Image: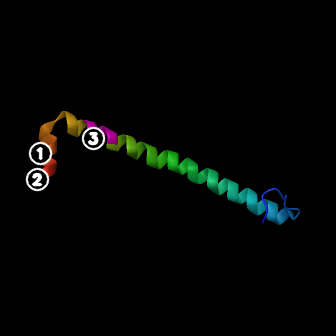
Amino acid sequence: MGVSSFPHNPITCLKTLNLEVVINFSFFAFRIIILPSFQILMYLLILKLESKDFSMMLKD
């Protein structure tokens, strides 16, 4: 399968288009789900660094 060769079959063209939609949607979901949870983790890390009682609670 060559990337440069354009599919003449409309069904194959539809499949590649569908694949692009799936890839774009997964990137969108990645930005919605992973990034906010990462920000929450960073926030918790800052809280942990600021308050030593919090880290003591985590160690128990």
- The answer to whether residue 55 is left or right of residue 18 is left
List the residue tagged with mark 2: 60
- The answer to whether residue 6 is left or right of residue 52 is right
> In the rendered structure, which amino acid carries the disc numbered 1?
Met
**Tag of residue 56:** 1
List the residue tagged with mark 3: 45
Task: Where is residue 60? Give x, y as percent.
Answer: 10, 53
- The answer to whether residue 21 is left or right of residue 57 is right
Span highlighted in magenta in the image: 42-46
Q: Are circles 1 and 3 on residues that touch, CB within 8 Å?
A: no
Q: Residue at x 49, y 46 (%)?
A: 32
**Res 46 → quadrant:** top left
> In the rendered structure, which amino acid carries the disc numbered 3?
Leu
Q: Please tell me whether residue 56 is drawn above or below residue 49 in the rendered image.
A: below
Question: What's the distance in space between the residues labelled 1 and 2, CA to CA?
Answer: 7 Å
Task: Where is residue 37? Give x, y as percent.
Answer: 39, 46
Q: Residue furthest right?
A: 8
Was residue 59 drawn as part of the magenta stretch in this picture? no
Question: What's the distance in space between the residues labelled 1 and 3, CA to CA?
Answer: 13 Å
Q: Residue furthest top?
A: 50
Q: Nearer the viewer, residue 50 or 5?
A: 5
Secondary structure state at the residue bearing disc 1: helix
Majority SS type along the magenta span: helix
> In the rendered structure, which amino acid carries the disc numbered 2?
Asp
Task: Where is residue 5? Give x, y as percent.
Answer: 84, 59
Q: Residue at x 13, y 38 (%)?
A: 52
Q: Are circles 1 and 2 on residues that touch, CB within 8 Å?
A: yes
Q: Tell me which label, 1 or 3, sits earlier in the chain.
A: 3
Was residue 45 drawn as part of the magenta stretch in this picture? yes
